[in-house]
């Protein structure tokens, strides 16, 4: 979407033929990426994002105003995305390389200004900057929300794994021990009393030996569901 808007602006204000080709070529690539199967799209995401950070945005630096344009703002989006593609020391290596790349580009742009296709006039420069700021904010906000929700979902999953039994979905021994310690302390202080009920499945070993552990697991799950269905909110 960002490339589509930029491509339209390039056509209106003539930022350069090469810039137009790059912009619209990337628009087509994004449309193709959306059209392919999710499995293929997932495999293409990483190389495509690397291409954006190291080829697409750097090339547009020279085609859309150089240091006077908006590409340096969009490069910050690449810096935001790259850490999610790599792990450990790779993150610092990739970010460092990307930062050095932009420093070299800016240096070349100052030393050889004829390589840069500057805006045709101040109006074109103004339109470029005014439209780029909200696009960057929208893109960064969207990615921030996406990452935040991904972390929330992951944390909920980790909390479930830590507190619940994977097979039955009921609270595990770790959670039960903490809960009982809290109850015992409250009972000692005279604040509250409680009853502990322990249930056992008769001849459960025979079920496993006769029908196999798969059936035994199904029995445990059904047992947990049956007991959970009759518990009150305070139980």
Image (spheres, helix red, strand yellow):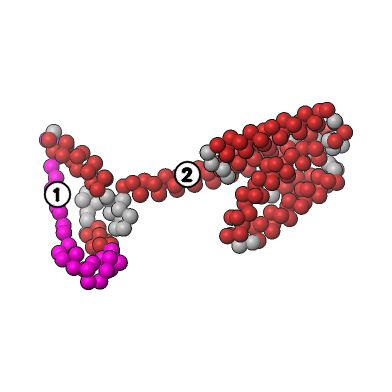
Q: Toward which corner of the image does residue 200 lie, by quadrant?
A: bottom left
Q: Residue at x 42, y 45 (%)?
A: 155
Q: Is residue 202 visible?
A: yes
Image: 25 above or below 183: below
Question: x%, y% of residue 208?
Answer: 23, 67
Reply yes or no: does residue 77 show up in magenta.
no
224 or 48: nearer the viewer: 48
Q: What is the number of callouts on the image?
A: 2
Question: x%, y% of residue 65?
Answer: 80, 35
Instruction: Give the mark nearer the N terminus: 1 vs 2.
Output: 2
Reply yes or no: does residue 196 show up in magenta.
yes
Q: Residue at x 31, y 51 (%)?
A: 164
Q: Residue at x 31, y 58 (%)?
A: 167
Q: Toward which corner of the image does residue 57 lie, by quadrant?
A: top right
70 or 131: nearer the viewer: 70
193 or 44: nearer the viewer: 44
Q: Secondary structure at mark 1?
A: loop
Image: 30 above or below 147: below
Q: Which residues are magenta?
A: 190-218
Q: Secondary structure at mark 2?
A: helix
Residue 141, which numbered label?
A: none
Q: Is residue 123 visible?
A: no
Q: Toward which corner of the image does residue 36 lie, by quadrant?
A: bottom right
Question: x%, y% of residue 186?
Answer: 16, 37
Horizontal side, residue 87 vs residue 114: left or right: left
CA separation in Å, label 1 and label 2 = 36 Å
Q: Badge 2 local density, few (<14 within 10 Å), some, or many (20+)? A: few
Residue farthest toward the bottom in the current orientation of the protein: 210
Question: x%, y% of residue 16?
Answer: 85, 43
Q: Which residue is mark 1?
A: 196
Q: Badge 1 local density, few (<14 within 10 Å), some, or many (20+)? A: few
Residue 151, which numbered label?
A: 2
């Amino acid at each position: 979407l960002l490339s589509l808007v930029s491509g339209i602006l390039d056509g209106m204000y003539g930022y350069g033929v090469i810039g137009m080709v790059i912009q619209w070529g990337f628009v087509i690539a994004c449309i193709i990426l959306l059209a392919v199967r999710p499995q293929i799209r997932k495999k293409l995401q990483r190389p495509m994002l690397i291409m954006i950070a190291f080829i697409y945005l750097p090339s547009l630096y020279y085609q859309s105003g150089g240091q006077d344009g908006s590409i340096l703002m969009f490069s910050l989006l690449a810096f935001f995305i790259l850490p999610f593609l790599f792990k450990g020391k790779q993150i610092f290596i990739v970010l460092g390389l990307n930062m050095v790349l932009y420093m070299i580009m800016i240096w070349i742009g100052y030393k050889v200004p004829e390589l840069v296709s500057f805006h045709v006039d101040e109006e074109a420069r103004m339109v470029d900057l005014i439209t780029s700021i909200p696009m960057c904010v929208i893109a960064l906000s969207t990615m921030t929300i996406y990452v935040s929700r991904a972390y929330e979902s992951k944390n909920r999953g980790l909390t479930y794994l830590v507190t619940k039994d994977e097979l039955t979905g009921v609270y595990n021994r770790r959670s039960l021990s903490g809960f009982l310690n809290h109850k015992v302390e409250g009972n000692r202080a005279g604040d509250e009393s409680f009853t502990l009920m322990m249930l056992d499945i008769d001849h459960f070993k025979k079920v496993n030996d006769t029908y196999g552990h798969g059936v035994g697991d199904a029995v445990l799950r059904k047992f947990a569901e049956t007991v959970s269905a009759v518990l009150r909110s305070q139980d």
